[in-house]
Amino acid sequence: MYLLGLGLIFLVMKYFGLGPVAAWEWRWVLSPFALAVLWWSWSDWSGHTKKVAMAKEDKRRQARIERNHEALGTSGKNKKR
């Protein structure tokens, strides 16, 4: 996502002739978009995207379980021995 943002900033700067980017060749201005495509391709191929999604889902599930235990009073924190 950062590469897309950088690419958009470079694109706007090149189009309006702002800063040093105005003097760059178009291939350098558009290169962040190509890098973003490469990153997404690698991320999907390697399973990185799926691992991140699964970790996020597990974290949400664990938080839900803990909330339910606290609501029922069985969280272990309030147990008397």
Image (cartoon, grey):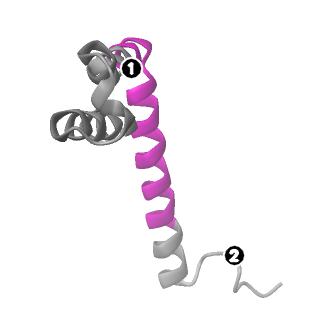
Q: Is residue 63 above or below residue 24?
A: below
Q: Determine if the magenta segment contains residue 7.
A: no
Q: Residue furthest right?
A: 81
Viewer-proximal residue among 70 and 39: 39
Q: Which residue is mark 2?
A: 76
Q: Which quarter of the image is occupied by the N terminus?
A: top left
Specify few, some or many for label 1: CA neighbours under 10 Å numbering under 14, 14-19, or 20 or more.
some
Please tell me which residue is depicted at 54% across the width and 80% down the height of the picture: 70
Q: Can you give x and y, in whole percent of width and height, for residue 44 in the image? A: 34, 18
Q: Residue furthest left?
A: 15
Viewer-proximal residue among 65 and 9: 9
21 sits to left or right of 81: left
Residue 39's tag is 1
Please tell me which residue is depicted at 46% across the width and 74% down the height of the picture: 68
Residue 69's tag is none
Please tell me which residue is depicted at 42% across the width and 19% down the height of the picture: 47
Q: Which residues are magenta?
A: 41-65
Q: Which quarter of the image is occupied by the C terminus?
A: bottom right
- Secondary element at image label 1: helix
